[in-house]
Image (cartoon, grey):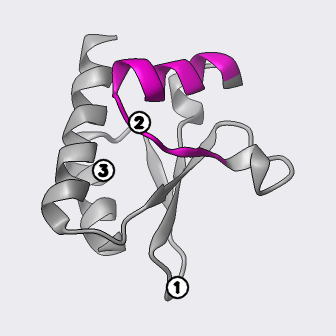
Amino acid sequence: MPTFVLEYLKAHIPQIKMIRLEATYLVWLDFRKLGLCSTKLKNFIQNKAKLGLSDAPVFVPGGKGFQRMNVACPRSVVKEALMRLKEAIRKS
């Protein structure tokens, strides 16, 4: 599933980069190119994209601008989340 996320981001949301990890169902998304402070990024993810991602600074010191996404679910669910994200960025 991480490969699907990586390819989708490259094709549809190039502003967001993915940190590729081996053998895990979690991916780290780099939102720094959006230029949002932590509060605005959290608001954007929750209220504009309607997603429940995890703030990276909770898990990693210096993780400002990153969000953690769990992709241990059907591809259709991951695709829906990515489409919401794409649409939210398009509208902002």
Farthest residue to the bottom: give it: 23
Q: Earlier in the sequence, mark 3 or mark 2?
A: 3
Q: Who's the residue at 24% across and 67% down the image? A: 4
Quadrant of the image occupied by residue 1: bottom left
| Residue 84 position in % (x across, y down) | 24, 34
Where, quadrant-wise, is the C terminus in this rendering?
top left
Dot 3 crowding, Cα within 10 Å, few <14, some 14–19, many 20+: many
Asked if disc 3 and disc 1 are in contact, CB closer than 8 Å, the reply is no
| Residue 64 position in % (x across, y down) | 73, 38
Residue type at numbered disc 3: Leu
The residue beneath circle 2 is 15
67 or 14: nearer the viewer = 67
Q: Earlier in the sequence, mark 2 or mark 1?
A: 2
| Residue 54 position in % (x across, y down) | 58, 47
Residue type at numbered disc 1: Glu
In the image, residue 30 sits, relative to residue 44, either above or below, namely: below
Q: Who's the residue at 60% across and 34% down the image? A: 32
The residue beneath circle 1 is 22
Farthest residue to the right: give it: 61
Dot 2 crowding, Cα within 10 Å, few <14, some 14–19, many 20+: some
Which dot marks residue 9? 3
Q: Secondary structure at mark 2?
A: loop
Relative horizontal placement of residue 74, taking residue 57 as reference (left or right) = left
